[in-house]
Image (cartoon, helix red, strand yellow):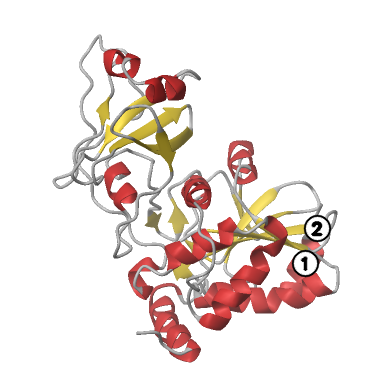
Amino acid sequence: MRHSRNALLAATTLVALSTLAQAQQCPTLPPVEVTPPLPVPSGTPDAGPVLRPTPTVPTPRLIPAEEIAASPALRRITSTGAKVYEIGNHVMNHGLQGVYAVNGDIFRVFYLTPDGQALIGGVLWEQDGHNVTRDTIAPIKGAIPTVTITAGKTAAGQNGTSADGRILSPEQVKHVAQANIGLEGRDGLPRLTMVIDPLCPWSIRALNTLEPFVARGQIQLALLPIAINDHENGNASTPAATALLSAVPYEMQATWQKIIDLHHVADDMPRTDEAALHLQQNMAVANAIGVPGTPTFIWRDKAGATHVTEGLPGDVEQRIRELGR
């Protein structure tokens, strides 16, 4: 059943207020307990990411060289140096072989056709909207980001704090540069990046607050979609974020406004496989910089330092004046 806009905002806001009232954010889920990493036998060469078994999903299996040699599609994937793992099984993957390919800190998910000749890149969804891919890559450490919040600080790379929030390290700034974003406002203006869940009421409120500054030509607003509110809205955030990432950058805000007006993703809104991968990448970026909820803001000051702040500041106009280019 689809609720009215007020019902959606009110219901979600009550949860947000009770858990993170000061920051005015929709909080991320607490981290899930996992089993320790599998031990690596001594003398065994590094096989890539540390894999964690779960009680319900098969532990991803490193695909051996002889299987790769027998499959033209797998040979294409590994030709650039990627390691490949089998994820899930043929039952979970509806007759396909799931393949997780990783090269350094970049990964992609593919599904191999039964003849071994062709690959389908993207996310496997079931008829009821269940994300099979998310389940099958969950045992791989780092594939699905989690953020641990302790004593008001995030565990992911705290490299310094100031009165204007945490200061990102150069490595974290590089992660932010790899994010998939939408843009509103002219190029060359001071940029304010907002990490959003498209169905988070605090993200929507922040957009409404910042729109006049964009219209007056004071800032360029960058939208960095992630999905953290699925547990509150019946798994509606992930398709909404995927729809945003299916739009070209300068049309993302308009797509978001349509979702806000409808309170959900319309059936005719494109949601591409590529966008689903971009959402995974954005979640990884959010994890790398320790995003505790949405909205979170990333901005550069006039001295060149990059800050992360949680929620809208009390004096938005002052923050705008502090932005560097």
Going by the image, does 36 lie left or right of 204? left
Disc 2 packing (10 Å; few <14; some 14–19; many ≥20): many
Going by the image, does 106 lie left or right of 176? left
Taking the spot 46% from the left edge, 70% from the top edge, the residue there is 26
Taking the spot 62% from the left edge, 75% from the top edge, the residue there is 257
The foreground one among 313 and 277 is 277
Locate residue 72, reporting x and y percent: 39, 20
Residue under label 2: 190
The foreground one among 205 and 117 is 117
The foreground one among 258 and 127 is 127
Q: Amino acid at mark 1?
A: Ile
**Separation of residues labelled 1 and 2 (CA atoms):** 8 Å
Helix, strand or loop under label 2: loop
* Viewer can see residue 315: no
Residue under label 1: 320
Vertical arrangement, residue 138 with respect to residue 250, above or below:
above
Circles 1, 2 touching at the beta carbon (< 8 Å): yes
Locate residue 266, reporting x and y percent: 50, 74
Q: Quadrant of the N terminus?
A: bottom left
